[in-house]
Image (tube, rainbow, N blue to C red):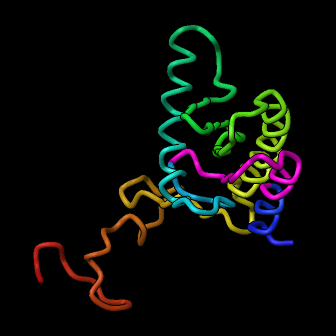
Amino acid sequence: MNTDAALLAELHRLRRAVPEISGALLAAVDGLLIAGDLPGTDPHHVAALSAANLGIGDRFAQLVGDGPLRESVVRGADGCVVVYPAGENGILTVVHPDTDLARLHAEARQAAQRLGALWDALRQPTVATAIPPATDPDAPLATRTPMAALPAGLWSSPGGRRSPGRQ
């Protein structure tokens, strides 16, 4: 099963566990959509608003000394939107009719942990895909050789040398 399918399967599992949920999505903390099961609503806008909600909620909870954010609930007249941190880099957002939030929290927190672990693992570079850091061209060389010590512009052709004052 590929990653996208695994993420969507977890969102579907959450919706099966709490049938009242009308939609759910996983977003990155920068507001980009990762996976969504949110019919009837633009998931990209919801993902962006989820990131803003998580940031404000987390800052608010820490400001008043309540510790890290567990969830943020926005209640409307006909239901609510609940945002859960999902690992270090993800956000689980659930749209719910506001009937039994205790049951939703129990299921959604577990789903957020699983989704967050999967997403965080995907974001870790592997040895095969890690990009080496760019080297600074002005940094000193590890091994100094006569040829390496000369500026690159002094060589006009292989074996030929130009004087620095002459072109």
Is the residue 86 above or below the residue 147 in the image?
above
Most distant residue in the front direction: 78
Image position of 18 (left or right of 82): right
Residue visible at 81% across and 44% down in the picture? 111
Quadrant including the C terminus: bottom left
The total of numbered circles placed on residues is 0
Image position of 40 (left or right of 121): left
Residue visible at 66% across and 62% down in the picture? 130
Q: Residue 90 magenta-drawn?
A: no
Q: Quadrant of residue 43?
A: bottom right
Q: What range of the chain is rendered magenta?
A: 11-30
Q: Nearer the viewer, residue 93 or 20?
A: 20
Q: Residue 16 magenta-drawn?
A: yes
Q: Quadrant of residue 96?
A: top right
Q: Quadrant of residue 146?
A: bottom left
Most distant residue in the top direction: 65
Q: Nearer the viewer, residue 93 or 159?
A: 93
Is the residue 8 above or below the residue 61 in the image?
below
Where in the figure is residue 57, as x and y percent of width and height?
Answer: 54, 26
The answer to whether residue 12 is visible is yes
Most distant residue in the left direction: 166
Where in the figure is residue 160, as x and y percent of width and height?
Answer: 31, 89
